[in-house]
Image: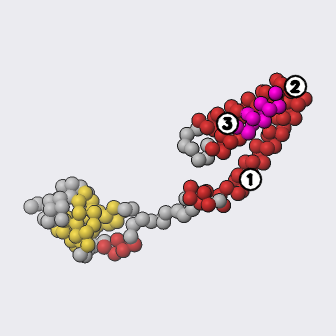
């Protein structure tokens, strides 16, 4: 009876650890670890220290072997290719033509509080103003591009 418990608990623990890869959360991983620890305890309790130590070494070897095989072969499977992101986002998400807009003039199609929409060069852009509120229709010039934000300044007379 003891050896069957050791094998059952170890295989259940291994199955739960593998299932942890596909199911979010850590409960399956914790249960798998407890099953493997339980199989070690059963090995020592039911079969004695000599067999228990042999079982511990065998389980450790099997766990390391399964882990290394998993690391080597799983990423190449069709399932892993659907689960794992293989390409990265481009370094810059700002269109390269935004830099050519610096210095160009346009007008606000919505109030800028401090973010609004401006038409510059025939296209609509989301813009931000460092001057605070700018009403709709205000003429603006592109001051600079910072990351994904286009900063504009008003062309109206500051006094009026």
Q: How far across and how far down the image is residue 81, in percent?
A: 59, 60
Q: State the extent of the magenta-drawn residues as a range.
A: 1-13
Mark 2 or mark 1, earlier in chain? 2
Q: How far across and how far down the image is residue 76, in percent?
A: 66, 61
Say if the magenta span includes residue 91.
no
Farthest residue to the top: give it: 45
**Alpha carbon distance from label 3 to label 1:** 18 Å
**Alpha carbon distance from label 3 to label 2:** 23 Å
Label 2 secondary element: helix
Say whether residue 159 is left or right of residue 22: left
Mark 3 or mark 2, earlier in chain? 3
| Quarter in which the C terminus is drawn | bottom left
Q: Which residue is mark 2?
A: 48
Report the residue at 67% width, 55% height from top: 74
Report the residue at 27% width, 62% height from top: 127
Q: How far across and how far down the image is residue 40, in percent?
A: 78, 31
Say whether residue 160 is left or right of residue 133: left
Q: Which residue is mark 1?
A: 69
Q: Which residue is mark 3?
A: 32
Report the residue at 61% width, 57% height from top: 80
């Amino acid at each position: 009876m003891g050896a069957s418990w050791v094998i059952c608990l170890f295989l259940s623990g291994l199955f739960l650890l593998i299932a942890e890869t596909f199911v979010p959360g850590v409960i399956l991983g914790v249960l798998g670890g407890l099953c493997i620890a339980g199989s070690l305890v059963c090995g020592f309790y039911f079969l004695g220290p000599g067999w228990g130590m042999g079982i511990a070494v065998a389980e450790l070897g099997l766990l390391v072997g399964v882990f290394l095989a998993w690391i080597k072969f799983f990423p190449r499977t069709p399932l892993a290719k659907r689960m794992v992101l293989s390409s990265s986002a481009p370094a810059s998400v700002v269109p390269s033509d935004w830099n050519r807009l610096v210095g160009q003039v346009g007008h606000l199609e919505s109030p800028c509080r401090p973010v609004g929409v401006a038409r510059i060069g025939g296209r609509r852009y989301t813009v931000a103003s460092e001057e605070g509120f700018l009403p709709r229709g205000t003429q603006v010039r592109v001051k600079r591009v910072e990351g994904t934000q286009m900063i504009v300044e008003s062309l109206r007379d500051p006094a009026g």
